[in-house]
Image (cartoon, grey):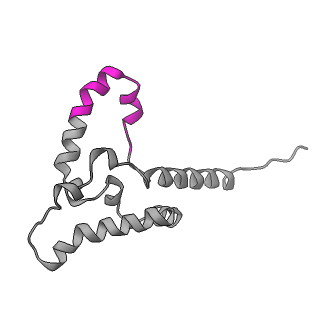
Amino acid sequence: MSQPSFTNFIIKRPWLLRWMKPLANWYADAAGHRKLGLKFDDLIPEESEVVLLALKRLPPKEAYDRVFRLRRAFQPFQASLAHQLLPKDQQTKPEEDTLYLSPIIKEIEAEIQERADLEAMVIKRKK
């Protein structure tokens, strides 16, 4: 299942959005995934069946881009143990850090929930 989110709650309240936006930007920069050229959804572990199915549903270009980002980010770690960041022009910019996998994961979870609800449905005959 996907993690709980307060996004809708915050977006509906402009005063809270103005307060949280700088904090969110600071946190995203401090996380360091953008400095390695990764997007936020690249950090989702591939251990769940839902995530594996979502990865299969990705368009071919997005799947290729994901693999490229992961290989580029972790190749320096394989060659040496030194922590090397990408040059500024290759780092992921905040406007490029869009969610591409999370919407598919939510869609798959909704399908699984719908399937479970339909399978649990009890049909009663009229007498």
Classified by dominant secondary structure, the portion drawn in magenta counts as helix
Which residue is located at x 42 percent, y 68 percent?
A: 64
Q: Which residues are magenta?
A: 4-22
Percent coordinates x, y for residue 83 in the rendering:
10, 66
Q: Is residue 107 magenta?
A: no
Is residue 117 shown left or right of residue 12? right
Which residue is located at x 44 percent, y 66 percent?
A: 63
Which residue is located at x 32 percent, y 53 percent?
A: 40
**Which image quarter is the C terminus in?**
top right
From what the image shows, is residue 53 above or below residue 123? below
Percent coordinates x, y for residue 77 in the rendering:
17, 73
In the image, farthest residue toward the left: 82
User: How many labels were placed on the picture?
Assistant: 0
In the image, farthest residue toward the bottom: 79
Percent coordinates x, y for residue 65 in the rendering:
38, 64
Pick the front one: 13 or 97: 97
Pick the front one: 13 or 96: 96
Pick the front one: 61 or 117: 61
